[in-house]
Amino acid sequence: MLESEIHYVDVGDKRAAHTFLPLHGNPTSAYLWRNIIPLLSPVGRVVVPDLIGMGKSGKPGIDYTFKDHIMYIDAFISQLGLQNIILVVQDWGSGIGFHYANRFRTMIAGIVFFEAIVRPISWSDATFLERIIFKRFRHPKKGYNMIVKKNFFVNRFLPMMTGRKLSSEEMDHYREPFLNEKDRLPLFVWPSQISIGGFPKYSTDVIQSYSEYLPISEVPKLMFHVRPGMIIKKKEAQQIIATWKNLEAVDLGKGKHYIQETHPTEIGEGIVKWYRNIFGAE
């Protein structure tokens, strides 16, 4: 038995044909989807969890590895009895969601993704600045000092990679779950879970497996991409567009990483348009 609870938003018609399941990443929460949820709820059920240890979810004494988050979201989906799921994923939410889609293929009706972890990477895939930042994040002492002691991920990295100035009220929402140092452990662990050069093995195996499945899957897919982006840069987007089956791609123009904050209307309306085209929904 898992020892904690997942907080979630649940809106829209529970009898709807499909359930949209937006999954966030590091260091955010369901709050990141606040301006997209109202655009999706008229056409389906929308269930938006906070990952364990993040947002308003519980803070159990676990390691907060990729595997831990996967187990909690697996249990969450099972507990709510979600079916006919349309994943809407970004950042680590994509790793969790893609892995679920790979293992439970009949449960997934569609996949929407952006700034997503689509394959294992090497350090050469990152820019010079990204290599400096993430090598520091992954350092057991320097990273801990930055992320846990100084709350760098929330105070600096999040606004730096958003693409617009976040208001004081918005920053307060993002800071609130991590006001205490002890609660910032998930933020520190996440960077160490990124598959870079084959390490760590668990993440690499999971990501490699779904990276082989997703391009050939017939599940309808919608990708939003931006420039310059952080994970899905121009070259990556072009590769996905050229090789993935049953994929529609939308170029949102300028953007960084947390594009829910800069392009919420375009994302929400784009998902609804795609959904209606694919599933014939009114």
Image: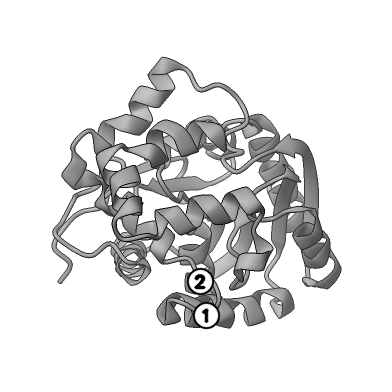
Q: Dot 1: what SS?
A: loop
Q: Which residue appears farthest toward the right when viewing the image?
A: 242
Please give the name of the residue rendered at 29% of the width and 51% of the height, measured from the top-left corner: 144
Front residue of 10 and 48: 48
**Circles 1 and 2 in contact, beta carbons < 8 Å:** yes
Picture layout, residue 133 above or below residue 261: below
Residue of label 1: 198
Q: Quadrant of residue 217?
A: bottom right
**Residue 64 in view:** yes
Label 1 sits on what residue type? Answer: Gly
Q: Dot 2: what SS?
A: loop
In the picture, the quarter occupied by the N terminus is: bottom left
Left or right, 121 with reference to 137: right
The x and y percentages for residue 263 are 66, 33
> What colour scheme governs how the chains and residues are painted in the rendered image of this protein?
one colour
The x and y percentages for residue 73 are 35, 63
Picture layout, residue 206 above or below residue 175: below
Please give the name of the residue rendered at 81% of the width and 66% of the height, measured from the top-left corner: 239
Label 2 sits on what residue type? Answer: Ser
The x and y percentages for residue 78 are 33, 67
Picture layout, residue 125 above or below residue 179: below
Cα–Cα span, label 1 and label 2: 6 Å
In the picture, the quarter occupied by the C terminus is: top right
Residue of label 2: 195
Please give the name of the residue rendered at 47% of the width and 71% of the height, measured from the top-left corner: 100
